[in-house]
Amino acid sequence: MLSLLTRKKSFRDPWVGHPGLNRRWQLHRHRVQLAETFCLGRRLLRPAHLASLERDGYVTLENFLPQPEFEALRDVVESVVSRASRLHPVQDNTWLGFHPKQPFAGGFDRFDGGTLNRFLHIDPEHMPRAAAFSHDQRLSAGSRQIIGLPMNPRKLDIYLTVHGEETRTPDLQKVLHRDTFFRALKFFVFFAAGSTSGWTFRIIAGQPSS
């Protein structure tokens, strides 16, 4: 029952997905309303910074970093991605659906159909420039505006997407959907396409609201 007090959202959980509680007592609806109430309460304590983010649900910030800083950070990301690709060569997936994490030292892979999502953790000791970026206060400003909480630097990863064959193994994440009952925000800092067609790497930060 304690799972009802957490961010747990899978209806495979015996309490979150309890048929009786959801049909008779509207459990899921109440969890959504409660999460929204907590979020709005936190946001009342902080000023709005990015009106377009609140209005449109997204905002694009061009030239976020000065060119020298951007290029230096891009070089770090390229180096980390290349090293991971050498140590853990990208594999193909022929199975349908969303797959569990496949952890390795420094990160993990996760397939959605034929698409590989590779997350590489930012190690402050070996990636000080990327770690410094993860503390950028402008990220926290955007986070506060949407969910009422500052950005958590530990939730920021280097993210590599490798698009696979989608005729037989489609990527379900590309279908517009909502899979949380609470407000959430993601930051994407795009760098470049890699040497292999279909590769994109970027820094991603996911921030839940409660």
Image: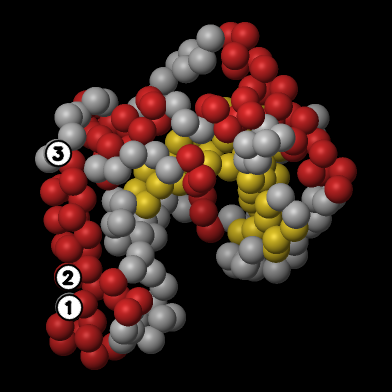
Q: Residue at x 51, y 45 (%)?
A: 154
Residue 126 falls in which quadrant of the image? top right
Does residue 114 show up? no
> Residue 26 — which label?
1
Q: Position of residue 85 (x, y in %)?
A: 81, 43
Query: Looking at the image, which residue is at 64% across and 63% down?
Result: 101
- Between discs 3 and 2, the one toward the N terminus: 2
- Return the residue at label 3: 45
- Rendered image: mark on residue 39: none
Which mark's residue is nearer the viewer, 3 or 1? 3
Is 132 placed left or right of 150 in the picture? right
Q: Nearer the viewer, mark 3 or mark 2?
A: 3
Q: Amino acid at mark 1?
A: Gln
Task: Name the residue that disc number 2 marks.
Answer: 30
Q: First in sequence: mark 3 or mark 1? A: 1
Across and down, in percent, residue 197 comes to 76, 35
User: Relative to 105, is 21 above or below?
Assistant: below
Q: CA distance from mark 3 to mark 2?
A: 24 Å
Tell me the amino acid under the disc marked 2: His
Which element type, helix, strand or loop, lies under badge 3?
Answer: loop
- Mark 2 vs mark 1, foreground winner is 2
> Does residue 124 lie above or below 115 as drawn?
above
How crowded is the residue under tag 3: few (<14 C-alpha within 10 Å), some, or many (20+)?
few
Q: Secondary structure at mark 1?
A: loop
* Residue type pointed to by label 3: Leu
Distance of label 2 from label 1 (alpha carbons): 6 Å
What's the residue at 70%, 68% (across, down)?
95
**Which residue, as the protein is rendered here, is positioned at the far front?**
125
